[in-house]
């Protein structure tokens, strides 16, 4: 659809159609060059004529429809030398681009006349644009006044026709005449008004790019570059920015491009210059927005640094006795320390941070206007300079008493900066639609280089912005299309939904157009770029949306008019307010009691004046419309509705009448054959072959419809060919005739038949009349002079058209149809859709007249059309809506474009515009209402009656909030949902093309069935064998290495009936799974012995597990005391071997004996301790799934389902939850699976049950629920606590309100006390209920936790306050102070702390969440027949995959489960699991891992491990276990936690008692007691503070949170650390023992050198050697064969000559006869045994190889030594550097290997390891580690093999290479997933960083309690009068836990040592 969207159709090569589809494509694609030239023109001539095209415009008379235009176009294009031809039927013109060397204008004119039209050559019209539109970014605008100033200045420039300045986007759109004024002059005009201008787009027909040039040292070099670039053709302008080393170029993209510029720069001079695209050059608006956000954020933070102390010294510390005394000390005369501090701190805020407001005000006033900055500057200056005056007076006068307003100026600036920050943040989100569109363009592209014949010579990855016109780009499956273009090779399906809205992928083949930013689905495409840069469809859509967001809605004029007078009016109003209050005070116009004690009448008046000045907000008015328009157009774009600006939006919301075109609007616009009536006895296929053969030569749309329909009878052919038609003739307006297969065929209307003297039978007449009545066109077909049939052709109605008209009626919008079609068809369509008013046979101008007539009747008219003939009406209508699949002219003329071509989007457009204008009205109501109400309140209208006044800083905050609120109100539009009626209406995008590309669904994919059975086995026998597998265990003696094990395994697997074979070389065992009906144990034993080993059948060992591990989730734990209680209870259960409870993860891991205790009993134990328990995993070798069953009405049903499931084989346990309709099933995944359960459930009873996988409630879900719960509780507590806090601590200082609160109700009981009591009660008993429950559960089991402290502290404060209130109500002279604010604020702060804590704790386990997200949600299950053919495919929930299922994985999809490839080949990205950066090639038989991503081919995978068995599940389990495992250092916290809470309670009581007794017996002066309380209350406050400040949580979270983050970070770095113990040990490591093979070396032998002694060619030599060695399983043999393949790299899978008489000589080599030559490959002893002499030259080569740790292999051919091959296991990249870095970290390295001493010493020397032990058996390795540990070393062992396992277990820390054996990985403490040696350093470094963090946590947690408790107990009170109120103590306690978690979270920023960044180490890939 969008190929037509924006101008210029792409060129298609009609002669380049592929024959035979994809099967004919060669590996090196070839296609003819373009453009076309006459036959016989050689390549050299074509290059000469390119670029010499001419253009001619012809007037063509006689065309009536698009078919005529098509005839003309086709005729012209058939001429040689035609580049392009475009025919405009509306204006009767044809434009032709041609090569004058091959064709001339006269020939073209004659060709047009030959088609039957009159043609005249007309002069080519000038194409120079008289008006251009440039876009300029403007920095520094703050309100509507600024934008109006700039707009007025631009419109005053001569040559500017129109200028629009948008405050919301900070951009200007200027329509100007380039002959009169230039872009630079426009920018100068803007800069003169005081704002910074940056050119975005000049509007000229050229592109622009910025390049960064490195290597330029002098101005002379830059001048040379400038001259070189200006000399290039197509370059329009070059701007040099020497400071930034930047060159900006303007150029014509059809002539040159950015790669040419880079090439010129890099080849200029001495070739030392390097050029690339300037970083961030393409980011545009987004980068500017980010920069602005960061700037405001930085300013705000700095202002806070200075303002917070100013605020505290002026408004908080004055109420703290000790601090107040210090601040009131005099420095000079009456100047106090507090005033001096405030002056010093507020000065940088006023003049440095607030400098931007001075600059803005100066620029504005300089041009005679006043903006927001003027108000801010005046307001803050008034407050600041009056304060300076007050300070100077105080310093010079001994008696002056005045109050400064420094906090007013500083806080005002801070709040305004906060408001601006939030405003730009919100404004940035209004343009998300553009950002999303920009993101569609890919960053890189693959550029192909072609030869003259079109063969691919090379490919190169380039920046996507460097693509030039006519480049050929390769698009692989899953990649984005890099530019607009057309396909020249390949076929695929492309997902265009992001551009066109078409949901289904569109088939693409040679000649088809593609759109940049769309996604290639499945095949490789080569495309030729036609439109790049600013010309691309994507760029034009972005420009359209940007222009829409720039365009002002007419309603915006209202705000613009107000803005002109707003600021001056506010300044006058502010001055008059100050003057009025000042004069009223001066002449005693109000009582003196109105003036607050801290100020005089002048200061009171000044505060009122400043408040008026800063509360007024013109920004809110200015942003009301543009922000809503921006969001509205952005939302429209995301819905596929492109709205061209505010005018269109405003008009659309008023629409009450819609005029619809018919063809292509209400109908599809493509005629289709809907019915066929044969009048002669003939086969329908034969009939259509004759008709199609005649019609295929016609360009008429009806002819094309007939041919397309005829193709359906030839579905077996992709591109059917029709019989040849002779004597073809087209009779204009009637039809066609031709001779086909010797028969005369005439196809046309009734008049054609009459003209040809053919009688029309009555049946045909009736059928024609019937067709016309149904709005169909009847076509008669005559064969040999007789009517043989009648075709009915119709343009069908679009789906949902009728429903759309009905919905519009319900929206009070009238629908009318105006069409150029005949009345019959028009009435028929109108009746079908429900349109009452119809106008038919209307010409384009008549459509426009009808629109104007409707407007004259008072209607607001929208026109919906798609064709050129609709353009006048689209322009005339109030709102023109063009169908996205319509013509370019219609789209250009329209105001709104419906991209998806769905009629339902007409409703969406109108509804969205109505919603947008509702939002604009709301914005205006708020903006005007705010100013109308706010200004009088700020002026003090409420002060005389209530005593209420608005301080300037609060007024400033309100002003800032008003702008933010308007933007946020507009942002709510982002939640727009289209009308509900459309959700019920299923309207699909119309797909015009009938796509037949790709594989036919009927073609079965075939591959052999698995497992293998003997040849000739019937399917029935194979089916019976399934499920009857038997397991046998053999002792195999004589195996020495992995090669031996491979030989045994291969020998066994070659037997028929073998399902699986696994060989354990370390324990000399082989486990075989086989089908006894095909093979027995004796045959297996004989096969092993034939391989050269001794085999004996063993009795299979039992595999019963005597110890299992279960995991349980525990809800309700709050501190270490809770976790210790649960842990102790579990460990006391008989049968439990060990239990670990982690507070951070809220889980328990229990090791238990299932024969003694069950997991249910363990859960009951936890629930008895007072916590909720939920089973996560039972630990048995079982999988578990929960199913939701719908349709259960009675308990009997669920019992019946349970019995049915229990009867299934492999089901171990079933739990039912009737109230949740949930069934939990534990089962053996190798026997049965979840789909079987669902089938069983749904077939039970009367089959009315429906089962699905139960929605998961995983740890993350529980965490989210907990976060929401705490957040909700905190918000509710705030609702009640804030009024309590205000009434007790803030409103008491506001005279009018204080008086009201102090009103007595009964005796001394006040209104304030009653309010506080009522509000604090729900906080205490409803919101705080969880603390009561928690403390009750803890105390019930004899322990005390955090909840006990909170409950005791809050109860003490609350019930003492209740006592005070009751005493006040009963006694007339009682005076007491309540503590209601203490209890409610305490609970509020603790809830806030818990909320932040669970929020932070959730982030500590992000590693697991990321791992879990790797698994795909769905999978495609294939059904196969007995022969392995695919019979069906079905999308299923991936959790329903069962073992042996066959799963289809398409390109770009995730692999759904572990398994092996059965069919297909592809590359799979395994980096997320293995760390391997490069995609790994996968072919049949290769293993794949679940969660990895398939890159480019389709794979069919057989599932081998599912559910809990999968590699991903095991990695998740490993990380979870690591995060659960306690580090030994954690025991310290556990010991403290047992006694902590009881000790704090005793201490709290003792503190209260001590202070109470001290007060009772007057042990301290009475003056110590604050005036508002007595000694008992003072003592009570100290006791409560001690109780609530103590925090055991911080201690309990110190270790586990750091361990969780550390292990999570390790997992993200590819290092799996198995718990806290491994982490703690790793940080102490000072000695590392390395294995050699596979650890320090790659572990895969490779050929490193070859020496040939005779004259044999290398290819022949290696063919003989490979043919011999290919039969061997030895690793050295495989290395030789792999090397030989490289010599035959032209073949993908080379075949070797046949080897006869093959023999393997154990320990020596192999021999065979190849091509009648005796070939022997082996060591020296094998040569001597076969009497082959080894010359001295060979002896020397062998010695050299051994010295280099290489193995020398001798090759003899016909008893003569032919050559020597040196094989080595190469050192891993960077091994030497790793050893060196370890030394610098104080870690010694030792190598212990089973290899020989020569090789070991060579490797050690190369890596600089000093200590080496060689020829060591596995037990010797472990002993060496024990010796090192005995010497005082903390030892780590790094290994990969089975033989390393004992040493890995013995070491303090075992590190296994990820590519190593399963046994080594199981034995290790740390797994290096990427198999990189550098990760050894990372593991040690990370563990050291983690334990530094743990130490910090402990220092903080202990230090906090050690310091905090004494301060809360009042140790500072006697000397400083400082005491800690309980609510602040509670806040500190909450903060301590949060700070520990946040401290641990800083580990997430871990960066590996810098030395590793310098070290370039590639990941090692071991296959």
Image (cartoon, rainbow, N blue to C red):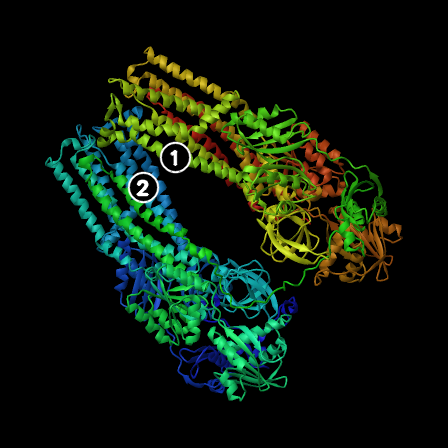
Q: Nearer the viewer, mark 1 or mark 2?
A: 1
User: Does residue 35 appear in the picture of this structure?
Assistant: no
Nearer-the-camera pick, 709 or 393: 709
| Left or right: residue 1310 compared with residue 806 | left
Furthest toward the top, the residue is: 1561
Residue matched to label 1: 1276
User: Does residue 1846 appear in the picture of this structure?
Assistant: yes
| Left or right: residue 1060 compared with residue 124 | right
Dot 1 falls on a residue whose secondary structure is: helix
Residue at x 26%, y 41% (from the top left corner): 955
| Left or right: residue 1209 compared with residue 493 | right
Question: Residue 122 shows which numbered tag?
Answer: none
Question: Residue 414 shows which numbered tag?
Answer: 2
Q: Where is residue 1356, by image quadrant?
A: top left
Q: 10 Å neighbourhood of mark 2: few (<14), some, or many (≥20)?
A: many
Up/down of 1582 relative to 467, above or below: above
Residue 387 percent coordinates (x, y): 22, 37
Q: Earlier in the sequence, mark 1 or mark 2?
A: 2
Dot 2 falls on a residue whose secondary structure is: helix
């Amino acid at each position: 659809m969008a190929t037509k969207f924006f101008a210029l159709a792409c060129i298609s090569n009609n002669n380049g159609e592929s024959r035979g589809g994809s099967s004919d494509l060669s590996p090196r694609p070839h296609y003819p060059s373009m453009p076309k030239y006459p036959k016989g023109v050689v390549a050299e001539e074509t290059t000469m004529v390119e670029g010499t095209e001419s253009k001619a415009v012809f007037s063509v008379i006689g065309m009536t429809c698009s078919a005529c235009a098509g005839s003309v176009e086709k005729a012209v294009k058939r001429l040689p030398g035609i580049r392009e031809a475009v025919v405009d039927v509306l204006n009767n013109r044809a434009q032709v681009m041609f090569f004058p060397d091959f064709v001339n204008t006269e020939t073209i004119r004659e060709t047009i006349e030959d088609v039957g039209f009159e043609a005249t050559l007309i002069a080519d019209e000038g194409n120079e644009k008289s008006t251009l539109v440039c876009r300029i970014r403007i920095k520094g605008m703050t309100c509507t006044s600024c934008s109006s100033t700039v707009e007025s200045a631009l419109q005053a420039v001569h040559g500017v026709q129109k200028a629009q300045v948008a405050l919301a986007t900070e951009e200007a759109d200027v329509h100007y005449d380039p002959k009169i004024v230039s872009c630079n002059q426009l920018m100068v005009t803007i800069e003169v008004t005081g704002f910074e201008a940056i050119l975005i787009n000049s509007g000229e027909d050229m592109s622009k790019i910025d390049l960064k040039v490195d290597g330029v040292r002098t101005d002379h070099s830059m001048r040379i570059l400038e001259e070189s670039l200006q000399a290039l053709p197509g370059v329009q302008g070059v701007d040099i920015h020497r400071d930034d080393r930047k060159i900006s170029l303007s150029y014509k993209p059809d002539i040159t491009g950015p790669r040419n510029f880079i090439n010129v720069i890099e080849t200029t001079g001495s070739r030392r210059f390097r050029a690339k695209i300037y970083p961030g050059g393409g980011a545009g608006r987004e980068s500017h927005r980010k920069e602005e956000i960061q700037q405001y954020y930085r300013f705000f933070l700095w202002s806070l640094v200075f303002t917070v102390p100013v605020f505290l010294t002026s408004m908080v510390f004055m109420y703290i006795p000790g601090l107040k005394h210090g601040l009131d000390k005099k420095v000079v005369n009456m100047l106090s320390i507090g005033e001096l501090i405030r002056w010093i701190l507020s000065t940088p805020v006023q003049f440095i941070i607030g400098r931007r407001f001075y600059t803005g005000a100066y620029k504005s006033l300089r041009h005679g206007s006043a903006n927001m900055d003027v108000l801010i500057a005046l307001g803050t200056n008034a407050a600041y300079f009056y304060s300076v005056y007050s300070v100077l007076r105080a310093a010079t006068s001994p008696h002056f008493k005045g109050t400064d307003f420094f906090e007013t100026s500083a806080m005002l600036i801070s709040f305004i900066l906060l408001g601006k920050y939030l405003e730009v943040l919100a404004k940035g989100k209004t343009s998300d639609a553009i950002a999303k569109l920009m993101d569609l363009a890919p960053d890189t592209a693959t550029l192909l280089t072609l030869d003259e014949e079109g063969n691919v010579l090379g490919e190169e990855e380039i920046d996507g912005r460097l693509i030039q016109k006519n480049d050929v780009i390769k698009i692989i499956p899953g990649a984005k299309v890099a530019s607009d273009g057309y396909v020249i090779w390949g076929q695929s399906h492309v997902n265009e939904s992001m551009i066109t809205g078409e949901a289904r992928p569109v088939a693409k083949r040679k000649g088809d157009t593609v759109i940049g930013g769309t996604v290639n689905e499945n095949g490789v495409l080569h495309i030729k770029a036609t439109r790049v840069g600013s010309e691309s469809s994507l760029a034009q859509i972005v420009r359209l949306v940007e222009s829409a967001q720039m365009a002002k809605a007419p309603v915006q004029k209202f705000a613009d008019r107000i803005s002109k007078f707003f600021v001056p009016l506010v300044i006058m109003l502010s001055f008059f307010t100050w003057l009025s209050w000042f004069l009223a005070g001066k002449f005693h116009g109000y009582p003196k009691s109105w003036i607050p004690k801290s100020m005089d009448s002048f200061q009171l008046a000044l505060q009122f004046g400043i408040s008026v000045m800063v509360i007024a907000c013109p920004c809110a008015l200015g942003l009301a419309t543009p922000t809503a328009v921006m969001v509205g157009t952005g939302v429209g774009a995301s819905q596929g509705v492109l709205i061209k600006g505010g005018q269109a939006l405003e008009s659309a919301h008023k629409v009450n009448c819609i005029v619809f075109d018919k063809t292509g609007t209400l109908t599809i616009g493509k005629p289709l054959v809907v019915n066929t009536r044969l009048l002669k006895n003939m086969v329908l296929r034969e009939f259509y072959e004759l008709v199609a053969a005649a019609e295929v030569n016609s360009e008429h749309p009806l002819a094309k419809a007939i041919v397309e329909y005829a193709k359906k009878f030839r579905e077996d052919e992709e591109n059917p060919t029709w019989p040849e038609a002779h004597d073809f003739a087209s009779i204009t307006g009637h039809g066609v005739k031709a001779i086909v297969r010797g028969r005369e065929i005439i196809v046309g209307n009734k008049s054609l038949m009459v003209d040809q003297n053919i009688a029309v039978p009555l049946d045909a007449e009736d059928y024609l009349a019937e067709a016309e009545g149904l709005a169909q066109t009847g076509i008669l077909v005559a064969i040999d002079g007789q009517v043989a049939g009648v075709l009915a052709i119709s343009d069908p109605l679009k789906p949902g058209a009728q429903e759309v008209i009905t919905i519009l009626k319900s929206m009070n919008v009238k629908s009318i149809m105006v069409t150029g079609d005949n009345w019959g068809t028009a009435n028929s369509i109108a009746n079908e859709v429900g349109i009452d008013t119809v106008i038919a046979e209307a010409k384009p101008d008549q459509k426009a007249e009808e629109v104007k007539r409707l407007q004259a009747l008072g209607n607001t008219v929208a026109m919906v059309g798609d064709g050129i003939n609709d353009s006048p009406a689209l322009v005339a209508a109030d709102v023109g809506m063009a169908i996205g699949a319509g013509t370019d002219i219609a789209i250009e003329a329209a105001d709104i474009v419906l991209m998806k071509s769905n009629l339902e989007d007409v409703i969406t457009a109108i509804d969205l515009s109505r919603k947008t204008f509702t939002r604009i009205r709301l914005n205006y109501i708020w903006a005007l209402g705010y100013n109308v109400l706010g200004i009088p309140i700020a002026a003090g209208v409420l002060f005389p009656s209530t005593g209420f006044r608005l301080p300037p800083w609060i007024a400033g905050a309100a002003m800032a909030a008003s702008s933010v609120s308007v933007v946020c109100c507009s942002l709510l539009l982002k939640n727009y949902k289209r009308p509900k009626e459309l959700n019920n209406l299923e309207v699909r995008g119309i797909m015009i093309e009938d796509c037949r590309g790709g594989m036919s669904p009927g073609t079965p994919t075939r591959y052999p069935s698995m497992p293998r059975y003997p040849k000739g086995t019937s399917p029935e026998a194979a089916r019976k064998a399934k499920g009857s597998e038997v397991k046998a265990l053999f002792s195999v003696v004589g195996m020495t290495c992995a090669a031996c094990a491979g030989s045994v395994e291969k020998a066994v697997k070659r037997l028929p009936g073998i399902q699986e074979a696994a060989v354990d070389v370390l324990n000399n065992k082989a486990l075989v799974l086989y089908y006894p009906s095909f093979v027995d144990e004796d045959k297996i034993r004989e096969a092993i012995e034939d391989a050269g080993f001794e085999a004996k059948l063993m009795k299979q060992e039992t595999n019963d597990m005597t110890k299992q591990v279960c995991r349980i989730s525990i809800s309700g734990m709050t501190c270490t005391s809770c976790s210790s209680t649960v842990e102790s209870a579990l460990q006391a259960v008989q049968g439990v071997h060990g239990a670990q409870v982690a507070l951070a993860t809220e889980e328990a891991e229990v090791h238990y004996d299932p024969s003694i205790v069950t997991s249910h009993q363990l859960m009951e134990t936890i629930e008895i301790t007072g916590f909720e328990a939920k089973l996560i995993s039972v630990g048995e070798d079982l999988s578990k799934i929960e199913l939701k069953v719908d349709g259960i009405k009675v308990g009997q049903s669920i019992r019946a389902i349970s019995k049915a499931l229990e009867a299934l084989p492999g089901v171990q346990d079933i739990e039912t939850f009737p109230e949740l309709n949930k069934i939990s099933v534990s089962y053996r995944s190798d026997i049965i699976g979840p789909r079987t359960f669902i089938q069983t459930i749904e077939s039970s009873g009367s089959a009315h049950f429906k089962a699905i996988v139960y929605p998961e409630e995983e740890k993350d879900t529980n965490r989210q629920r907990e976060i929401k719960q705490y957040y909700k509780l905190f918000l509710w507590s705030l609702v009640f606590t804030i009024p309590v806090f205000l009434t007790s601590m803030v409103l008491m200082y506001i005279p009018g309100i204080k008086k009201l609160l102090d009103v007595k109700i009964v005796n001394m009981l006040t209104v304030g006390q009653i309010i506080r009591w009522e509000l604090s009660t729900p906080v205490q008993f409803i919101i705080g209920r969880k603390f009561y429950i928690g403390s009750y559960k803890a105390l019930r089991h004899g322990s005390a936790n955090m909840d006990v402290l909170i409950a005791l502290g809050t109860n003490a404060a609350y019930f003492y306050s209740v006592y005070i209130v009751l005493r006040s109500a009963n006694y007339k002279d009682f005076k007491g102070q309540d503590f209601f604010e203490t209890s409610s604020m305490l609970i509020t702060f603790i809830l806030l702390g818990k909320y932040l804590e669970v929020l932070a704790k959730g982030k500590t386990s992000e590693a697991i969440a990321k791992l879990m997200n790797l698994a795909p949600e769905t999978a495609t299950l294939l059904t196969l027949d007995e022969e392995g053919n695919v019979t069906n495919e079905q999308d299923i929930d991936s959790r329903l995959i069962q073992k042996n299922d066959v799963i289809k994985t398409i390109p770009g999809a995730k692999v759904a489960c572990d398994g092996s490839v059965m069919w297909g080949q592809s590359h799979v990205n395994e980096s997320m699991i293995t760390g391997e950066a490069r995609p790994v090639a996968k072919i049949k038989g290769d293993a794949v891992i679940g969660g990895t991503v398939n890159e480019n081919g389709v794979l069919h995978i057989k599932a081998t491990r599912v559910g809990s068995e999968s590699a991903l599940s095991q990695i998740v389990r490993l990380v979870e276990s690591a995060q659960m495992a306690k580090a030994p250092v954690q025991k310290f916290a556990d010991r403290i936690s047992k006694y902590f809470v009881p000790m704090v309670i005793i201490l709290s009581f003792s503190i209260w008692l001590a202070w109470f007794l001290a007060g009772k017996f007057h042990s301290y002066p009475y003056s110590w007691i604050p005036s508002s309380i007595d000694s008992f209350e003072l003592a009570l406050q100290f006791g409560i503070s001690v109780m609530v400040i103590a925090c055991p949580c911080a201690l309990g979270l110190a270790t586990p949170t750091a361990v969780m983050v550390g292990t999570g970070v390790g997992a993200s770095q590819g290092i799996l650390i198995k718990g806290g113990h491994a982490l703690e040990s790793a940080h102490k490591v000072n000695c590392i023992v390395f294995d050699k093979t596979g650890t320090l070396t790659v572990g895969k032998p490779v050929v490193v050198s070859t020496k040939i002694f005779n004259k044999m060619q290398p290819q022949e030599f290696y063919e003989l050697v490979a043919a011999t060695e290919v039969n061997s399983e030895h690793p050295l043999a495989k290395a030789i064969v792999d090397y030989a393949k490289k010599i035959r790299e032209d073949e993908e899978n080379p075949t070797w000559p046949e080897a006869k008489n093959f023999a393997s000589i154990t320990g020596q080599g192999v021999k065979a006869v190849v091509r009648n030559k005796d070939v022997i490959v082996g060591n020296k002893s094998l040569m001597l045994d076969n009497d082959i002499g080894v010359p001295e030259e060979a002896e020397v080569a062998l010695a050299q190889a051994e010295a280099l740790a290489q193995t020398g292999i001798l090759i003899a051919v016909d008893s003569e030594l032919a050559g020597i091959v040196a094989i080595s296991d190469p050192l891993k990249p960077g091994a030497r550097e790793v050893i060196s870095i370890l030394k610098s970290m104080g870690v010694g390295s030792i190598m212990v290997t089973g290899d020989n001493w020569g090789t070991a010493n060579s490797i050690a020397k190369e890596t600089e390891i000093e200590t080496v032990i060689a020829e060591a058996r596995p037990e010797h390795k472990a002993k060496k580690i024990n010796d090192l540990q005995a010497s005082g070393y903390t030892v780590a062992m790094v290994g990969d093999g089975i033989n390393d396992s004992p040493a890995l277990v013995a070491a303090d820390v075992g590190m296994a290479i990820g590519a190593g054996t399963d046994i080594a990985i199981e034995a290790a403490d740390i797994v290096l997933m990427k198999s990189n040696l550098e990760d050894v350093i990372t593991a040690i470094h990370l563990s050291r960083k983690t334990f530094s963090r743990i130490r910090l946590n402990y220092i903080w947690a202990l230090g906090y309690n050690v310091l905090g408790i004494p301060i809360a107990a009042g140790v500072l009170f006697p000397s400083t009068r400082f005491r800690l109120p309980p609510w602040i103590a509670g806040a500190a306690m909450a903060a301590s836990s949060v700070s520990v978690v946040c401290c641990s979270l800083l580990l997430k920023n871990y960066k590996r040592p810098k030395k590793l960044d310098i070290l370039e180490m590639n990941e090692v890939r071991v296959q």
